[in-house]
Image: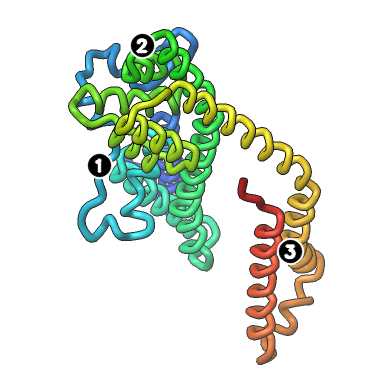
Amino acid sequence: MTMPAFTDQDLAYLIYCGIALGVLLVFTGGAQLFSRRENHAEAKSRRMRMIAKGRNTAELLALLKPAPKRGILSRLPLVGDLPHQLRRAGLTLRADQFVAICVLLTILVFAAIVVTFGPTLALPLALTIGLALPVVVVKARCKSQTTKLLHQLPDAMDMMARGLKVGHPLNNSIGAVAREMADPIGTEFGIVFDQVNYGDDLPDAFQEFAERVDIEDVYYLAASIGIQHGTGGDLASVIETLSRTIRDRIAIRRKIRAISSEGRLSAWFLSSLPVVIFGFTSFTAPDYYAGVMGDPMFKPMAAAIIVMSIANMLILKKLVEFRI
């Protein structure tokens, strides 16, 4: 009995199945690593869940507090700041795991595009999907977590002020915030609480907290606690005043965002209009641009249009963004 011949079509099917399985494993593993599945029955912050599992203070600080930047790699714009960005985004990935997933995804996408469409655009598309897109997702999550922490900050400061007014020590008030409030501020205050219990000075712990989250209002809080720690005074009143100021600034930001919504929509429309026109024209009349690509002036004119479109986008973005 003869075995059936193994044709090129069978080999192509096996390659497709392998690529599909690899992409599925990458996305499934990424979803498991990036997701932070929580429900109301669980602890309110990642730090409290780790404590419930029996982690001690040293382990908590090692896992939750980012390591200091050292060496030549720490000076690179992406690789050096990647552990800090992942921690700010609230992700449980290490930097080497994130890079490995990005490289594997790039290779799989490159192989899929080469097999399906050819090698013409395989490399730029693979780099965009495998490297640029995950970085954009991390940046967006960092921004989301920072905004969430800023909105939680007044409630945390009010809780601290109430604890100080009834006579609790400042460190106990910080511990109450760490226990009662959800992430991201619950874990951040928990790190401060653990640092103080581990022997660090309270002003230094809050200064490191401000540098980790890089929020102006947190720098004000760190400065207030540092001054009170050195000179004394009514810290509860200072924290209450700062809390009201932060709430007012958040309200003003929301009003300005609502007022400037029309300008931001116009900026998005004007920035995307050249791309939409180019795409629609290329689809409906392919020879409109292809017919003049051989002209010597085509490349300089195309480069000038791209530069002016990017400059227009940046100028409009600057006009509709306000810092409060």
Amino acid on which disc 3 is placed: Gly
Q: From the viewer's perspective, tell me whether residue 227 is left or right of residue 126.
A: left
In the image, residue 171 sits, relative to residue 18, either above or below, namely above
Question: What numbered label is drawn on residue 279?
Answer: 3
Using the rendered image of the protein, determine whether residue 9 is visible from the camera's viewpoint. no
Q: CA distance from mark 1 to mark 3?
A: 46 Å
Amino acid on which disc 2 is placed: His
Q: CA distance from mark 2 to mark 1?
A: 32 Å
**Residue 153 pos. (x, y %):** 50, 28
Neighbor class of circle 1 (other Cα within 10 Å; few <14, some 14-19, many 20+) is: few
- Say which label, 2 or 1, has the lower sequence index: 1
Would you identify the image quadrant in which residue 32 lies?
A: top left
- Say which label, 3 or 2, has the lower sequence index: 2
**Residue 83 pos. (x, y %):** 33, 44
Do the residues bearing badges 2 and 1 touch, measured as CB atoms within 8 Å? no
Question: What numbered label is drawn on residue 67?
Answer: 1
Q: From the viewer's perspective, tell me whether residue 239 is left or right of residue 86.
A: right
Which residue, given by chain and number where applicable, does mark 2 sit on?
Answer: 168
Would you identify the image quadrant in which residue 56 lies?
A: top left
Q: Secondary structure at mark 3?
A: helix
**Residue 8 pos. (x, y %):** 43, 54
Q: CA distance from mark 3 to mark 2?
A: 64 Å
Q: Secondary structure at mark 1?
A: loop
**Residue 109 pos. (x, y %):** 46, 52
